[in-house]
Image (cartoon, rainbow, N blue to C red):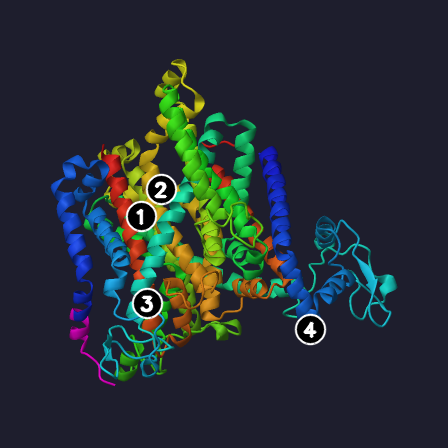
Amino acid sequence: MDTLTHFQVFTTLLIRFLPVWIAMIATFALSVTFRKRLGLYGKLFDSTVGMVGLGFVLFWVFTAIFADQIAPFDVLAQIGPMKNAPAGALVPDGAGVYLLGGDHLGRDVFSRMVAGSRIVISIAPLATLFAFMVGITLGLPAGFWGGRLDAVLSFLANLVLAFPVILLFYLLVTPEVVQTGLPQRMAAVLFILPLVFAILLTNSRLYVKPQLRNLIVGAIVVIGGWAYLALVSEADSGINVLPAAVDLIHVPANLLIVFVSVVFVNAPTVFRIVRGLTLDIRTRDYVAAAQTRGERPWYIMLWEILPNARGPLIVDFCLRIGYTTILLGTLGFFGLGLSPESPDWGSTINAGRKLLTTAPLPAIVPALALMSLVLGLNLLADGLREESLRD
Amino acid sequence: MTGFLLRRLALLVLTAFCLTMVVFYLTNLPPQLEKIAKFEAGARISDDEVTSWLNNHGYGRPFLARYGEWLGVVPGWTGTDTQGGAMGYCIKKDVDPANAPRYCGVLQGDWGYSSVFKQPVSSILSTRLGLTGILMFWVMVVMVPTSLLMGVLAGMREGSRLDRTLSTVAITTTSTPEYVSGVVLIVLFASSTVGLSPHLFDWGWISERTLFKGSASSAMDGITFQNFTLPVITIALYGIGYIARMTRASMAEVMTAQYIRTARLKGLSFREVVMRHALRNALIAPFTVIMLQFPWLLNGVVITETLFNYKGFGWTLVQAAGNNDVPLLLGCSVVAVFVVLVTQLLSDVGYAFLNPRIRIG
């Protein structure tokens, strides 16, 4: 089989990522120019560690955005003779080149890796965001009011945390459990909390301007409520509350359970962090001042305590996206949830590990991709921590 | 102290109780039971036959009764099989039904019978835990000294080049989950076609085709440097970075303390200060972290044992969960939950023991 030299493979790879390089240079140039006005994000450019981390993260974000332009082949296209092909192997009829070789079914490893980034980049941050909204909505009142509410919520959080993650995944992410509609019911409970969070946030802020408050909270209830119902309602399942005409959001059951279980695993840790921060900040003078002014509990929690807890929370958010990426990879590695055909990194590592000693590329490429993304997020978190501690 | 311990133990039992109930519920959902019926009685049976098989074999009882049965507080079900003989939850093969006990749950020491391995759960768990124990021992032997040394060296001169280098190494290992490091290590050291092994073989440095073995299945009979290095390093790597970072932070904080400055000013050498004054105080925080690493290590153990085909506790958990082997899965989860909760307790108690400023009432 004809192959390109390593140097040719390297240069071709660089050229294939051209849209990513352009987007990254543009982002960096703009950010450095306006960094004085960009707050914490702008300060990131004073720290080498933070900039390197941001570079890795942006690389994968833009790769996910431009995945269709970068990947030369379809993720499922199998070309027989290209089974376990080496890096830089030319496709027989001159249709192109398998830059990083072929897998055990003759699919392009490079294209699958690029397409896999899209799955990770779209699920991991969103799941982390949901976990944060769940954790914040429950953690603030637990830390602020304490008492029995705190005892119950803390016990539940510790209960989830005492579960070994993999056991939980094996119990939740199976076709039988999906069949019972349990993921939907869990989604119904977990996804209502972000909605509650948004309503409390706006309601407490605009309480003194009733007309505006009614308008905005009403809009959130209508739009958010619709999105919530459309998300959890699925035809032919346990929860089918919306008529088909307005039930526009369809998430495949196996994707939903992956999302739900990742949120479920992360939320208790966020809860504990928020609770701890709230317990600390609650004793500050400005909270006492707000109470003396007669501000209501939710206003104090969401507009006095939460903004002052943002530093550690932003850092943890970055770290947690990385952790979620690892969790998604773990799910794929055990063949849970997403279909085996799926190009996500965990599943491809799992498929590639069987022939690891003879054809290493199909497993090594997604493994290094996953590692570089997590490393980028960890470095970014480190940079943010350094910069936020500085003031 | 006694009151604290008793409260924590009560909480531990309550947590284990709730968690096993959750596991029991999830493994006994109707579709799961249907799978069991089809596994035992043949895949092609009709829905009615599934229902009657389940009712005849004690699966038709209410959830709480069945959970109590497993726990050993509700009498086991009894019935008759197709030949008219007695059968039941507590009636074992080759045992006279008349002598069978009424209760046979976990509280009586009977963990049930694994449907996949065809062995009592308790004997499977003890052998598998023994194998995992060996693995964990070596992981600790590698992980704890390495990470503490890295952390102390990095933290004693904050901002130095050594600190920067070691911190970068630490952050890289925390970003490398076991399934990534395992794959990379196998390719680097255990492949006869790529990585280091072919070169080493050509140069005549190693007598076998590969430097290390990519499978640890032979390690179950006897551990050698070749078959056990990679799994141990794989698990240890992920933890090393985390513990090293905690140690570094703790060390860096201690080094700025007043008494360190005093020690320096009274003329002690830097070495002396670090060894005699800083180290002891800096190692209190990492102790907690190391204890709390156990639950994380459990994840690593499951991944690594699957990857390296080492048939320990983690491998068993995957087999039990993958085949819906309910008694074995419940046994595994009880063990896993106890590991998590007991290490939490030990880390709290140990922290109070090491740090005289903390008092538990």
Identify the residue position indicated by label 3 in the image.
A112
Q: Are marks 2 and 4 on the same chain?
A: yes
Q: Is residue B93 left or right of residue A127?
A: right
The amino acid type found where label 2 is placed reads Ala
The residue tagged 1 is B152
Q: Residues within 10 Å of mark 4 (few under 14, many from 20)?
A: few
Q: Is the same chain shared between marks 2 and 3?
A: no
Kind of residue at disc 1 = Val
- Which contiguous range is marked in magenta? A1-11
Relative to A149, does residue A96 appear above or below in the rendering? below
Q: Nearer the viewer, mark 2 or mark 4?
A: 4
Q: Looking at the picture, does residue B38 appear above or below residue B1?
A: below
The Cα–Cα distance between marks 2 and 3, rounded to whole angstroms, is 46 Å
> Are the numbered discs 3 and 1 placed on the same chain, yes or no?
no
Q: Secondary structure at mark 2?
A: helix
Residue at image point 63% right, 60% down? B31
Distance, label 1 to label 2, CA atoms, is 8 Å
Residue holding disc 2: B282
- Foreground mark, 3 or 1, reads 3
Query: Which residue position is annotated with label 4?
Result: B42
Q: Is residue A193 visible?
A: yes
Instruction: Give x and y (percent) for residue B196.
Output: 29, 75
Q: Chain of mark 1?
A: B
Residue A108, image x, y percentages: 31, 73
Is there a contact, CB below 8 Å, between mark 1 and mark 2? yes
Residue A324 image point, x, y percent: 39, 52
The reply to whether dot 2 and dot 3 touch (C-beta < 8 Å) is no
Q: Position of residue B185 (x, y in %)?
A: 35, 68
